[in-house]
Image (tube, grey):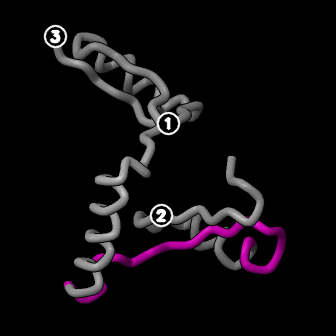
Amino acid sequence: MLEPEGVYLTTAPSPAIFVQMPWTARFGSRRAVVAFTGLRAAAEKRRDLLVIKELAEASALTAVVGVGYPLARIADAYRHVDAGHKKGSIVVTMA
């Protein structure tokens, strides 16, 4: 689902991503990368958060919402995620 030259960035390392990182670095235009963001200095994280704040204030961020479920159907929401076909975030609404 990545654009050409896109980068899949995760902060949750897994065996699969560690296999994909060297493969995607060598072949193709899309890359997989792990960011160990918790290991950075607080000043660096602060700069990043300020950039995100500016983007949010400028309405330059778009949330991708795949589907919504009422709280009463939370089990269906989990099944949807577990099926592996999720596109966008799953929103759980409360009445």
Identify the amino acid type marked 3. Answer: Ala
Residue 88 image label:
1
Disc 1 or disc 2, which is closer to the eye?
1
**Quick one: which residue is furthest to the front in this view?**
58
Q: Name the residue under label 3.
A: 95
Q: Mark 2 packing: few (<14 Cα in 10 Å), some, or many (20+)? A: some
At x 45%, y 43%, the residue is 62
Q: How far apart are marks 2 and 3 (CA)?
A: 33 Å
Q: Of label 3 and label 1, which has the lower sequence position? A: 1
At x 62%, y 65%, the residue is 7
Q: Of label 2 and label 3, which has the lower sequence position? A: 2
Instruction: Work out whether 75 lies above or below 13.
Output: above
In the shown orientation, is residue 66 left or right of residue 29?
left
**Element type at mark 1:** loop
Q: Quadrant of residue 19?
A: bottom right
Instruction: Specify the quadrant that holds the C terminus.
Output: top left
Residue 10 image label:
2
Q: Distance between the residues labelled 1 and 2?
A: 15 Å
Whether residues under marks 2 and 3 lie with C-beta atoms below 8 angstroms apart, the answer is: no
Instruction: Work out whether 58 lies above or below 6.
Output: above
At x 28%, y 13%, the residue is 70
**Element type at mark 3:** loop
Identify the amino acid type marked 2. Answer: Thr
Task: Please give the range of residues in magenta.
Answer: 24-42
